[in-house]
Image (spheres, rainbow, N blue to C red):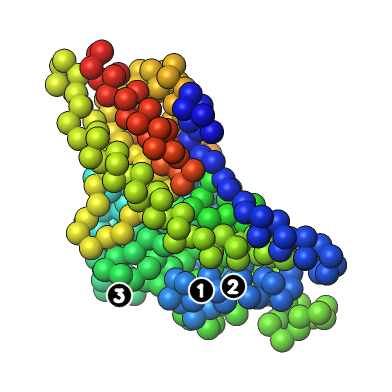
Amino acid sequence: MTGDDISIADPEVSQDAIDRVQSILESGQLADGPEVRTFEDEFAAYCGADHGVATSNGTTALHAALEAFGVEEGDAVVTSPFSFVASANAIRLAGGTPVFADIDPETYTLDPSSVERVLDRRNDIVGIMPVHLYGLAAPMDELGALADEYELFVLEDACQAHGAAIDGQRVGSFGDAACFSFYPTKNMTTGEGGTITTSDEGVAERAASYINHGRAETSHGSYEHVDLGHNYRMTSLAAAIGRTQLERLPEFNEARRENARYYDEQLAGPETDDGVGLETPAVPQGYRHVYHQYTIRVDDREALRESLADRGVGSGVYYPTPIHRQPAYETVSTAAADLPRSERAAEEAVSLPVHPNLTADDRRTVVEAVTDYFNST
């Protein structure tokens, strides 16, 4: 990567991963198999959960977990509208209805007070799906307390938060289950892939059956199907990559955190002549942010992005349209909900390169490009 071509993401696969994939290719066992079982166990242990169920991607992980909880038509699940659309799509694919609550404007994660207002006015809610966004955990203590009070399940959408933690406890171990994505731009990858972590043996068994065409856990290798399911399995090739990536995840996360610390220090305070500045990411006390994205807020996002592009600095907008304003959600009951914090974040949030492969020169170039924009405006 050169200083005049700084991309928003730069996935890295090591020679060790290539060698392991070669070994799997030579073994001939390319689909689901022992390599996947080992990856499931290793990733679950990393999160502090008892069970892992590897899947083909993060969306299928969310869908399978909701099926394992027994979500069906007439059930509603509270989630965030400020996320990738897969969060809500999975609820609909399982037959349920996504109900949106607003976010905390500083953390971009579900605001417990907004969730409580939703719970107080509806009697069809069966679960809460908090989204750990950009690498920062949602407020799990408060959301967990609400779930206990209203007797709801909690499914963590941890697709952007591998290794994030609250008071030393990693995401993937707070709720009744959690789901991760291993898309190439995530903090770790399997190429494509996902997983469910849970300490509930029943949830793990039902999810494992669902992703394998409804086979009973005891019927691997047979054609006895006890329920309806899909083929959402992870391949051994993906698991081999995932195992090497998991070994390097602490290194990757620390590099992201170091890049974020540099930005925090260097970007504090720039503003235009009109007094309009930028907001750097907020991290609550006790939270460990792993910076899947380093997301700032600015009033004129597109002007900043054009200026950055002129300097060879990539940027990303995640997400320009809240889910409840997506065309596919016009018929959903909460499509017209008043969620001003999510809508404002969708207009102002922009992410800067923070991936582990940034050099010191890259970071300086990013900072100079941002500060020069504000100085010239």
Q: Which residue is mark 1?
A: 44
Q: Nearer the viewer, mark 3 or mark 2?
A: 2
Residue at image point 51% right, 29% down = 2
* Residue kind at label 3, given as amino acid type: Asp
Q: Measure the alpha-carbon separation of dots 1 and 2.
A: 6 Å
Quarter of the image where one finds residue 42: bottom right
Q: Which residue is mark 2?
A: 40
* Residue kind at label 1, given as amino acid type: Ala
SS for callout 3: helix
Q: Position of residue 167 (x, y in %)?
A: 26, 68
Can residue 215 be seen here? The reply is: yes
Q: Is residue 297 left or right of residue 321?
A: left
Q: Position of residue 76 (x, y in %)?
A: 43, 60
Residue at image point 34% right, 34% down = 349
Quarter of the picture containing the C terminus is top left
Q: Measure the alpha-carbon separation of dots 3 and 2.
A: 28 Å
